[in-house]
Amino acid sequence: MANLEWSKLPFGYIPTCCNTRCYYKDGKWGEVEVSTSEYINMHMSATGLHYGQQAFEGLKAFRGKDGKIRLFRWEDNWERLCFSCRGILMPEIPKETFKEALLTVVKKNEEFIPPYGTGASLYIRPLVVGTGARIGVSPADEYLFLILVTPVGPYFPQGFKGVDIQIVRDADRAAPLGTGRYKIGGNYAASLASGARAVKEGFKTVLYLDACEKRYIDECGPANFFGIKGNSYITPKSTSILNSITNLSLCTLAEDMGLNVERRRIPVEELAELDEAGACGTAAVITPIKSIQDRETGKVYSYAEEPGPISTKLYKRLQGIQYGDEADKFGWTMEVL
Ligand SMILES: Cc1ncc(COP(=O)(O)O)c(C=O)c1O
C-alpha cells in the first residue's frame, strides 16, 4: 500500500506508478501499452492543442470492506467517451481496447486504491487527444488514448455537507446546440472564469442556466443538478448538459425508493418550491446544496443546513453499492481484484 494520508486526500493529482496508452495511426488503433512517464510527446501543431480535439472521462474504482476492488458503470463511461469522440470527429475507442487499458491501469496501481472507510477512491481519467499536426481547421489523422489514475478524496472537501452555490447570467458554459453534451475540455475552459469568480465570492460552484433564455436550470460547473419536491426527484432536461452517469443511477435509485422521477425543464423560480437540492457526479457524488444565490438579482433560495432525508438516503444507497456494502441489484459494478 502506498504511504499516503488516505483520509486527508484532496481531489487532486498524486503521481501513481503508471498509465496506459494506445495510439491511432493509419486508420486504426494499436496495442495497449504501459507507460511510467507522466508526460506526452506530441507535435506542436497537434489538433488537441489548437482546435480542442480532446475528450475525457471520469470514473472511479472503490475498495470494499471485503477487500475487493470494484469499478462503477465503466461501460457507460466508455459509451459516453465514444459519443464525445463522434461529436468532435475523433475515432471511437474499441470496447476491448478501453477495457484492457482500464483493467491494466487499475491492477497495476492497486497500491494506490485507498483503503475502505477513508472516504477516498481511485479516480480514473481516460483521455483522447488529437496528436496529428494540422494548421487548417480539420480533424487530425493521429490520436492518443490514455488512462491515468490518481487517488482522490471528495471533490468538495467539506464531505457530505451542504454548500452554497451561485447562479450566473453573464456567462454560458455551452450553447443549446453546442458541445455541452460532450465531455470535452472546451466546455470546462468556458466555465473557468465564472467558476473562479464564484469561489472568490464565497461559493463552491456555479449553477448555469440555459444559454438561450436564461429561464431554466442547466447544470453545475462539474456536476448535474437535482431537486426533491414532495415525492418527486426532479432533474433538468437540456441539450447542453453532460448526461451524468451518477444522475442516471440516482434516477434509478429514486424510482426504486418509490419516488417519481421527472426529467424536464426546471424554471429558475421553481427552486423556491424544492424541499432539497443537490449536485451529483462521479467527483461530487451527492453534494447537498444549502443555498443558491442569483448573482444578478440577489435572490437567495435557501434549504436546510443539514442534508435532507431523501438526499441522504440516495447518497447512502449509491455509496453502499459502489463500496460493495449493499447488494448490486442493478448490475452496476464489476469486480477487478
Ligand atoms: C459538467 C459535468 N456535469 C456532470 C458531471 C457528472 O457526470 P458523471 O456522473 O458521469 O460523473 C460531470 C463530471 O463528473 C461534469 O463535468
Image (cartoon, rainbow, N blue to C red):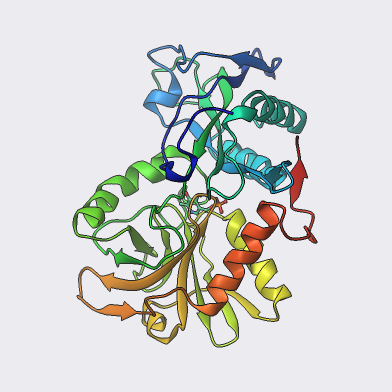
Q: Can you give x and y, in whole percent of width and height, for residue 240 in the image?
A: 47, 57
Residue 184 vertical placement versus 239 (above, below):
above
Question: Split into 4 quadrants, where in the image is the C terminus?
Answer: top right
Q: Can you give x and y, in whole percent of width and height, for residue 104 in the image?
A: 70, 24
Please identify the quarter of the rendering in which residue 234 is found: bottom right
Residue 90 seen: no
Residue 92 vertical placement versus 331 (above, below):
above
Please tell me which residue is depicted at 32% across the width and 58% down the height of the picture: 204
* Left or right: 326 as drawn, with respect to 207: right
Q: Which of 112 and 38 is in front in this view?
A: 112
Please tell me which residue is depicted at 65% across the width and 81% down the height of the picture: 260
Residue 147 vertical placement versus 135 (above, below):
below
Question: Split into 4 quadrants, where in the image is the N terminus?
Answer: top right
Q: Which of 189 and 159 is in front in this view?
A: 159
Q: Can you give x and y, in whole percent of width and height, for residue 153 in the image?
A: 47, 45
* Left or right: 283 as drawn, with respect to 203: right
Q: Can you give x and y, in whole percent of width and height, for residue 243 in the image?
A: 57, 55
Residue 310 vertical placement versus 60 (above, below):
below
Please tell me which residue is depicted at 69% across the width and 27% down the height of the picture: 107
